[in-house]
Image: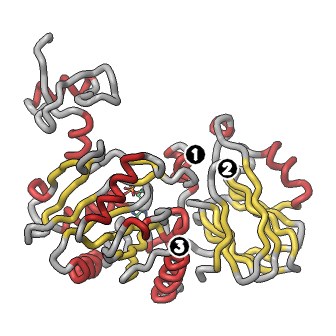
Amino acid sequence: TNEELYCIGCGAKIQSDDKNEPGYTPKAALQKGLETGELYCQRCFRLRHYNEVADVSLTDDDFLRLLNQLGQADALIVNVVDIFDFNGSLIPGLHRFVGDNPVLLVGNKEDLLPHSLKRSKIKDWMRQEANKQGLRPVEVALTSAKRGKDLEELLALIDEYRAGRDVYVVGVTNVGKSTLINKIIDNSTGVKDVITTSRFPGTTLDKIEIPLGDGHFLIDTPGIIHRHQMAHYLSPKELRLATPQKEIKPKVYQLNEGQTLFFGALARFDYISGGKQGVVVYVDNNLMIHRTKTEKASAFYEKHAGELLQPPTKAEMKDFPKLVRFEFKTTEKSDLVFAGLGWVTVKANSVVAGWAPEGVAVILRRAMI
Ligand code: GDP
């Protein structure tokens, strides 16, 4: 038809030519929308149905404007982080932008951590790591958005610290922020009525506002893209194989100097010096770990990546970034972290190297456990 059509959500003129322009609607969706009489552009459709907001890069101007607006608001800031990728999910410089607003630090994906770990210890560790980055949270909490675990407690905590103000929920992508927001929406009554969407003034960023009942809102902000997360270098399928899905069962490997562990073909750990020791590996329970001699490891990888060493598969290896090496010397019991994949705990005075796909961070931190 030549008739002009408009999105009933945002009022933009419907078009199927340019994904990046307002009103974009794929042709198939257009037909369906006309049949049901509810024609939304793709952006509005996603906001309504999946509670999706467009993510934003750390260097994006819109992102900086968003942070400035956080500082100007009188609100509680809830910063959701992934305890399995803690350092990778902190927002650089957040403390400079929040102004006087209190920050509640919420560690998500608690379900992945071994039961045996004391939760109070993990919270202390999170607080100390946050402090090192200049972030001084008023409170630290743990949750599992996926399980909806301790959601009531979290909501009570939010209510306590917001003290009658708005709440901004911030986080980098992949920490489970959408999952958490959806659980919060489910938890509130009348799902349809609780979501309202609007924009941050002066930006192209959408926000989702959930009324808190006293004229204030819980506001979901766009996810912030941190380029060194594993998630940006793997296909969704590979990512599912690489990221832990269930409670991790730590595995101890007695290593001699000059030994290497491969984690599928995704990453590699070299034990260089420090005497024979048991290192503890925290990765997905099903991820294949292969031990070999360091001197032969590179040739071994060349030959077996995508076959004996999987994931990724042989076909996927074609587009898989090469592994890049980072070397560290520990001064205390430490975790060598492969962002998003897991970590290896080693004792003090060890020299180790971590290899990860180019772009993915490998860092050394004080041992969490
Ligand atoms: P967002 O980008 O921060 O909005 O993250 P999503 O909500 O899309 O979640 C990212 C990934 O983490 C998805 O694969 C989720 O299934 C997973 N996820 C979210 N919450 C949890 C959780 O509590 N535990 C576990 N194990 N995975 C979670």
For the N terminus, which image quadrant?
top left
Residue projecting furthest to the right: 295
The disc at residue 233 is 1
Tell me, yes or no, whether the two marked residues, 2 and 1, touch with CB atoms within 8 Å.
yes
| Element at label 1 | loop
Q: Quadrant of the C terminus?
A: bottom right
Between circles 2 and 3, the one closer to the viewer is: 3
Q: Nearer the viewer, residue 334 or 240?
A: 334
Q: Which mark is residue 133?
A: 3
Number of residue marks = 3
- Residue named by callout 2: 357
Labels 3, 1: front one: 3
Q: Residue at left 74%, top 45%?
A: 305
Q: Is residue 120 left or right of residue 272?
A: left
* Residue 194 in view: yes
The spot of residue 310 in percent (x, y) is: 67, 49
Query: Which of the pair 134/257 is nearer the observer?
Result: 134
Say which quarter of the image contains residue 186: bottom left
Quadrant location of ligand 1?
Answer: bottom left
Distance, label 3 to label 1, CA atoms, is 26 Å
Position of 338 with respect to 48 (left or right) is right
Task: Say which element carries label 3.
Answer: loop
Q: Earlier in the sequence, mark 2 or mark 1?
A: 1
Q: Is residue 11 above or below residue 144?
A: above
Residue at x 32%, y 77% (from the top left corner): 102
